[in-house]
Amino acid sequence: MADKIKVALNGYGTIGKRVADAVMRQDDMTLVGIAKTKPDYEAYVASHKGYPIYAVDPAKAGPKFKAAGIEIAGSNLDMIKKADIVVDCAPEGIGEENKKIYEQLGKPAIFQGGEEHEVAGTSFNAAANYGEAIGKKFVRVVSCNTTGLCRLIYAIDKAFGVQKARVVLVRRGGDPNDAKRGPLNGIVPDPIQLPSHHGPDVQTVLPHINIETAAMKVPTTLMHMHFVNMSLKKRPSREEVLDVLRQWPRLWLIPSWYNIKFTGDAIEFGRELGRSRNDIMENAIWEESVTVDKEGEFNAFQAIHQESDVIPENIDCIRAMTGIEKDGMKSMAKTNKALGIGNFNPWKLAPP
Amino acid sequence: MADKIKVALNGYGTIGKRVADAVMRQDDMTLVGIAKTKPDYEAYVASHKGYPIYAVDPAKAGPKFKAAGIEIAGSNLDMIKKADIVVDCAPEGIGEENKKIYEQLGKPAIFQGGEEHEVAGTSFNAAANYGEAIGKKFVRVVSCNTTGLCRLIYAIDKAFGVQKARVVLVRRGGDPNDAKRGPLNGIVPDPIQLPSHHGPDVQTVLPHINIETAAMKVPTTLMHMHFVNMSLKKRPSREEVLDVLRQWPRLWLIPSWYNIKFTGDAIEFGRELGRSRNDIMENAIWEESVTVDKEGEFNAFQAIHQESDVIPENIDCIRAMTGIEKDGMKSMAKTNKALGIGNFNPWKLAPP
């Protein structure tokens, strides 16, 4: 094997901290370090994990890190210079500003779904378009919802052809550690004017898919929920549909006897499994809800863990962009194994 | 005009108390009284409104009412004997038991949507099938969600023909005065197995409508939200669709400049209007969300106030069953006027 890919994490919030941990679990990657703007409990844990910590603005943040007892390895520019590739996990919109830095330093970079497609020019989902990222300088891993939709729609489209997808997304109002978002009581059609951005966003990865999406926000922190309806070109039986879904480890069919009644149970299952941060990186599709109706339309409920489903996609995107693995299926299998995706045997996954 | 219709309210919870108030606002009806099983704050207010209060089981409840200082006019059986018609607003499933009483006493009765269609044999929505209730002994006013769907689907079907309706319902977990329901955090696909009961329930009123429904419960108390997609037989323009919706006062098109961003705003609007209990009895349809897509499919968001949208339907159902008004459109217009439905001029509706 070639030298390990040196990965720098610019930004260390909800996504960044998970990508850093996931990089550490890959045998073909190393973590150069993580960059943060200020010390906080996440930096505290990162430092105790032994991750090299770089400051985004050391002149300003250096004294704060020092006061917190956290050693700084340098500036985020120092970090980026040492890396083969940067995963940008800065807050929404900041990635676009950071792009100038990556261009100046001649480093390839992955952006997250909070950035516009145009920032990278290529939008990525491992199953759907791995090959398009190979050798690219800038690629965007699409958002949690778009990732969940691409996985499912790609699998069904490949097998049966999707004539039209109609998706209603019920989004969590904020993440568990977000004190500023809402709603606290109520249902927010968001946007009121149709369609939501999710349909066009799916088309940045799967341009040929005819899709309409509507979205709402509700008072929960745990996961998003999608109700997916698709008119198909072929007329498969329900069993044929289930057989297709079973081929994809990132599509998890929840067995009915698990008695996972809602998103709260799905996250509790992640906790029972001993998964890092109780993450459910797979699309959680209720097997019982998978239906082919009398017009041959596919219907299903799937829950999407907004904090973690894009993590394996970031890992695959690193392999594609650096060219260390040109076969998307092989990269996905490697990532899945390293992260325990599709493996619901608790003790194998994470010994207690 | 003939003598006023004497209406008895058997059950005085969320729906019962509103129907009682609504009956009081009609010039062709009088309220015989309301029946409750025990004294509480709702009984306290009812007694101060001067509503005759009857006890469901006076031997057991009488002393409790006496201790509470609330005078009892007799048993619920006494009340029912005095009435021309009973509106049964007992908790879900109790209506079926109560039916025996109504049969014994030879009184026509209206049941609520918590009861099965078979309890009454006729399910009712004023716009959709007023005529079917004329002269009937037992009729069920369908539930809040089904009422909201029947109103919208009937209007669109009448104008353009509905080939297939696909509806995703995001339901409030419990009412504002319900301390026992959930979820507190999470999204519940309910039921997981498709379809939800709402589609078949719409068909009890509109048997020819091809409809599929999926439902979720979320942590809110204020209103339900529907995302309604319909394939149509004709291909109307968006303006033609809006023109149809504008013909029905119970379909309220929310103007975008109102800045009603979510269900919380819709209820706040009810409070600003000075409406009784802030009720929004109309389907609250975001005008901006009404869309005819490139396949000619109708799409829209509508919020449904679970506590109140069935109230005008109960009033119309009384008129249909007693035959005091055989023209559904006339009854609806009369009810709308009496309850201020479709009238969003605050001071005309309820002087401060």
Image (cartoon, coloured by chain):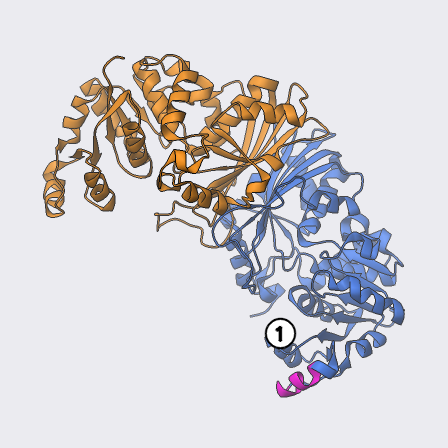
Chain colours: A orange, B blue
**Residue B66 drawn in magenta:** yes
Q: Does residue B70 appear left or right of residue A58 in this picture?
A: right
Q: Nearer the viewer, residue A311 or B153?
A: A311
Q: Which quarter shows the N terminus of chain A?
A: top left
Q: Quadrant of residue B316?
A: bottom right
Pinpoint residue B15: horizontal percent, then vertical percent.
67, 64
Q: Could you tell whether A79 is left or right of B102 in the image?
A: left
Would residue B77 be visible to someone looking at this image?
Answer: yes
Residue B111 quadrant: bottom right
Q: Residues within 10 Å of mark 1 (few under 14, many from 20)?
A: some
Q: Residue at x 76, y 63 (%)?
A: B95
Q: Residue at x 35, y 51 (%)?
A: A179
Measured along the vertical axis of the image, is residue B75 above or below residue B186? below
User: Which amino acid type is shown beneath numbered disc 1?
Assistant: Glu
Which chain does the numbered disc 1 sit on? B
Q: Nearer the viewer, residue A275 or B150?
A: A275
Tell me which segment is drawn in magenta. Answer: B61-69
Q: Please tell me whether residue B305 belongs to the stretch shown in magenta.
A: no
Q: Which residue is mark 1?
A: B42
Quarter of the view holding residue A85: top left
In the displayed structure, A244 sits above or below B19; it is above
| Residue B294 shows in this picture | no
- In-image side of B104 versus B252 (left or right): right
Q: Identify which residue is drawn at 77% across, 50% down.
A: B127
Residue at 64 percent across and 65 percent down: it is B14
